[in-house]
Structures are given as structure tokens and as C-alpha cells.
């Protein structure tokens, strides 16, 4: 079982998957209890966040002019700047709430990685960024967990209202 917990943590740390992939994999693929899967995936999703804030922008700035990695690094910088500008434009003084919801709505190109990069580019401040991203990750985890658990809930509800007739 530890192997599946570690796989869930690993999936949650990957930028494309994050919670959107880790929780369904844990519940449907590894048969981990949804509540346990939630907490493990949140932990995994938060592990890289401080490192992203502290180092990602510096590494991307360094690599944007390099021959083989420049295009990808420039793309990542543009993506972070675009997300940061969008957050800043929509939020005004409510940047904390905007970042929390940006991370918390589990859609493609939103999440802890992009949100943290945007916070770093906006120089939002380490503690404020970490708290906003953490709250967003908690929210995203709840949303994904509900979506994952809905089929089970509907199965339970339909079993309450259907009767089985014994066969003779």
C-alpha cells in the first residue's frame, strides 16, 4: 500500500497531473480511500511549491537564451507572466483571493505550479503566496474528490431506491 501512496504523491507533484490526476488514480486505480487520497495528493502537490517560488523564475530567466532549452523556458516564462498579468488585472487588491481561486479551480493550465510561478513573477511575497496556493490546493482537492466520489454516491443512492426481486 505504501507504494501506491508514494505513486499518488509523485503524480500530485507533476505539473500536468497535480490533483486532477493524482486523486482519480489513487481512488480508481489504486483503490485508496478517497479521504486518504485527498490528503496524500494535497501533500504531494504542495511539496514542490516553495521550490517553484524560490527558484523557478531564476532558472527560467537563466535558460531562456540557451540553445536547446530556450524555447521551452521562454514559453514557461510567458505562461507565468500571462497568468500573473491576468490575476493582477482581475483582482486589484484581492490578489490573495484571486490566486487562491486560480489554483483552486482544477482546470488545465491552472494549479499550484502555474499559480506559484505567477505569484513569483508578481513578487507577491513568499508567505502570502504559500498560504494562497495552499488554500487553492485544498479547494481543488475537494472539487476533484467530489467529482471522483460522485459515481459512488449515485450508485449508493440508486441502490436505496431500487428493489431486487428474489428469483424463484
Image (spheres, rainbow, N blue to C red):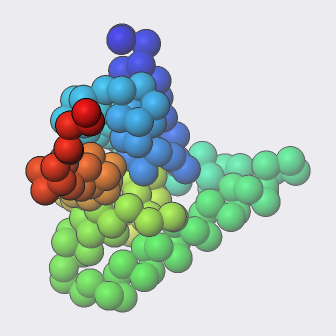
Looking at the image, the residue that sits furthest to the top is 2
What residue is rendered at 38% in x and 61% in y? 106
What residue is rendered at 38% in x and 53% in y? 112
What residue is rendered at 88% in x and 50% in y? 67
Residue 63 image position (x, y, % from top left): 71, 50
* Quadrant where the C terminus is found in the figure: top left
Q: Is residue 33 above or below residue 124?
A: above
Q: Is residue 17 above or below residue 89?
A: above
Q: Is residue 87 above or below residue 26?
A: below
* Quadrant where the N terminus is found in the figure: top left
Looking at the image, the residue that sits furthest to the front is 168
The foreground one among 87 and 166 is 166
Asked if one can make out residue 161 in the rendered structure from this viewpoint, the answer is yes
Residue 75 image position (x, y, % from top left): 68, 64
Residue 93 image position (x, y, % from top left): 19, 83
The foreground one among 134 and 29 is 29
Number of residue marks:
0
110 left or right of 143? right
What residue is rendered at 24% in x and 64% in y? 100
Asked if one can make out residue 45 in the rendered structure from this viewpoint, the answer is no
Looking at the image, the residue that sits furthest to the left is 160
98 left or right of 64? left
Residue 76 image position (x, y, % from top left): 62, 60
Amino acid at each position: 500500500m505504501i507504494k501506491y501512496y508514494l505513486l499518488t504523491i509523485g503524480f500530485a507533484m507533476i505539473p500536468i497531473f497535480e490533483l486532477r490526476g493524482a486523486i482519480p488514480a489513487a481512488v480508481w486505480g489504486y483503490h485508496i480511500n478517497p479521504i486518504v487520497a485527498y490528503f496524500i495528493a494535497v501533500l504531494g502537490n504542495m511539496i514542490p511549491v516553495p521550490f517553484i517560488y524560490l527558484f523557478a523564475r531564476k532558472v527560467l530567466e537563466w535558460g531562456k537564451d540557451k540553445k536547446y532549452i530556450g524555447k521551452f523556458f521562454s514559453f514557461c516564462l510567458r505562461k507565468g507572466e500571462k497568468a500573473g498579468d491576468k490575476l493582477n488585472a482581475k483582482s486589484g487588491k484581492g490578489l490573495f483571493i484571486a490566486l487562491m481561486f486560480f489554483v483552486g479551480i482544477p482546470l488545465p493550465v491552472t494549479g499550484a505550479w502555474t499559480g506559484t510561478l505567477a505569484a513569483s513573477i508578481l513578487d507577491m511575497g513568499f508567505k502570502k503566496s504559500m498560504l494562497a496556493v495552499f488554500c487553492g490546493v485544498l479547494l481543488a482537492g475537494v472539487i476533484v474528490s467530489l467529482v471522483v466520489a460522485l459515481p459512488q454516491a449515485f450508485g449508493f443512492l440508486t441502490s436505496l431506491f431500487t428493489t431486487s426481486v428474489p428469483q424463484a
